[in-house]
Image (cartoon, rainbow, N blue to C red):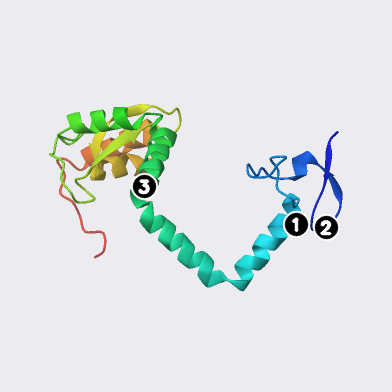
Amino acid sequence: MQMKRCRKCKELKPLAEFSKDMAARDGLQDRCRSCHSEDSAAFRARRPDYIHNHNVAYHAKHRSRLNAKRRKFHIAERFNLTVEEYDRIMANASTCAICSRSFGNTRDTRATLDHCHAGGGVRDVLCGKCNAALGFFDDSLELLRKAVRYMESFENRKVVNLCN
């Protein structure tokens, strides 16, 4: 097993204990991971303003690239689709598959891609209201059927105020 001595703690450790550093002659950092971690934590504790300002500046400079990366990950993780497939599906949808209302820009009318939480897979494009309704019923057909039977039981009856 190949070993390397840490510059800080002076211990001889396996190469796996050192992070990569392409600028170094051997391709590894001169401090082991635990010493590097301690040094980094100490620096962050001494200079929280520097770290915060650096992060804010980095995110401002790379906002569009970071947002695109986040969007790509979100679409792949949730829907198992590429960004192009997702955009094509959403571009072709104009009305909700349940209520047939046109999509708008509010939370209730915004187009959302419905997917099966249990088995995965995309179902169709719904308005926010219909998508939320399915979510409140935990995507359960039995609960939806009970809700329909409940609503149908009041179809021809006068509704009574139970508060009086």
- Quarter of the picture holding the C terminus: bottom left
Three-letter code, disc 2:
Cys
Packing grade of label 1 (10 A; few <14, some 14-19, many >=20) is some
Give the residue at mark 3: 67
Image location (x, y in percent) of residue 67: 36, 47
Image quadrant in which you'd find residue 2: top right
Nearer to us: label 3 or label 2: 2
For the point 40% across and 40% down, which residue is it? 74
Counting residues from the start of the chain, the first of labels 3 and 2 encountered is 2
Mark 3 nearby-residue class (10 Å; few <14, some 14–19, many ≥20):
few
Q: CA distance from mark 1 to mark 3?
A: 33 Å
Image coordinates of residue 102 in percent, x first then y, are 12, 39
- Which mark is on residue 9? 2
Q: Quick check: marks 3 and 2 in contact, CB under 8 Å?
A: no
Residue pictured at 15% horizontal, 45% vertical: 104
Mark 3: which secondary structure? helix
Which of these two is toward me, 160 or 81? 81
- Image height of 63 relative to 28, above or below: below
Q: State yes or no: discs 1 and 2 in contact (Cβ < 8 Å).
A: yes
Residue drawn 17% across the image and 36% down it: 99
Task: Give residue 50's position: percent from left, percent from top.
Answer: 52, 68
Residue that mark 1 sits on = 35
Q: Quadrant of residue 133?
A: top left
**Residue neighbourhood size for the residue with mark 2, other residues' Cα within 10 Å, grouped as few (<14), some (14–19), many (≥20):** few
